[in-house]
Image: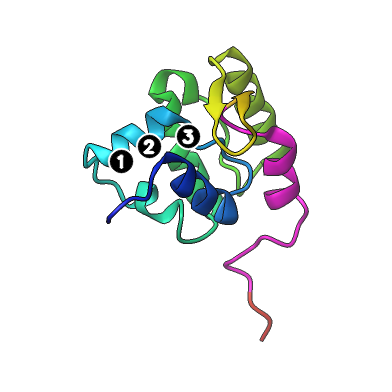
């Protein structure tokens, strides 16, 4: 994938995953060719709940994510634990907001996924 400049890529990512602060470390790792499907999907579509857990595991590491519940099973505990992790992380420059911000906007994350209408696997027969 050919990447835009930092701000351009941040705008694309924000269009799909509004809860994510597309910080420079994410951009740099993508520029260096880190190959993982979730990093390619960030600017293509909204991540699923299952993909969220995997993405946060990549970003925050297995030690911090150990014991974080499955977001499909217990969304409230999942988002609460992610909030605790995010609060301990260093803020990152947000090229859209032009200020230092946390990696994840927990309110936007909860609004996007926690409102009961995000079940991609559900179908009406």
Label 1 CA crowd tier, 10 Å (few <14, some 14–19, many 20+): some
Q: Mark 3 points at which residue?
A: 56
Label pair 2/1, CB-CB below 8 angstroms: yes
Classify 41 as above or below 125: above
Specify whether 30 is left or right of 98.
left
Specify whether 120 is left or right of 112.
left
Q: Which one is earlier in the sequence, the residue at label 1 or at label 3?
A: 1
Q: Which residue is drawn at 28% across and 55% down?
A: 2
Name the residue nearer the viewer: 48 or 39.
39
Whether residue 107 is in magenta: the answer is yes
Label 3 CA crowd tier, 10 Å (few <14, some 14–19, many 20+): some
Using the image, tell me which numbered label, if any, was put on residue 30. 1
Classify 104 as above or below 38: above
Q: Would residue 58 be seen by someone viewing this image from the given angle?
A: no
* Color style of the picture: rainbow
Which quadrant would residue 123 be assigned to in this image? bottom right
Name the residue nearer the viewer: 83 or 81.
83
Name the residue nearer the viewer: 107 or 7.
7
Q: Would residue 109 be seen by someone viewing this image from the given angle?
A: yes
Specify whether 84 is left or right of 8.
right
């Amino acid at each position: 994938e050919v990447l835009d400049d930092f701000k351009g890529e941040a705008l694309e990512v924000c269009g799909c995953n509004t809860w994510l602060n597309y910080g420079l470390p994410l951009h740099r790792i993508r520029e260096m060719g880190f190959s993982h499907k979730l990093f390619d999907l960030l600017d293509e579509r909204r991540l699923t709940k299952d993909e969220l857990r995997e993405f946060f595991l990549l970003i925050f590491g297995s030690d911090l994510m150990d014991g974080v519940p499955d977001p499909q099973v217990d969304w409230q505990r999942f988002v609460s634990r992610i909030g605790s992790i995010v609060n301990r992380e260093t803020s990152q420059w947000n090229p859209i907001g032009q200020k230092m911000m946390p990696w994840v906007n927990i309110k936007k994350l909860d609004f996007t996924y926690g409102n009961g209408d995000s079940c991609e696997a559900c179908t009406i027969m």
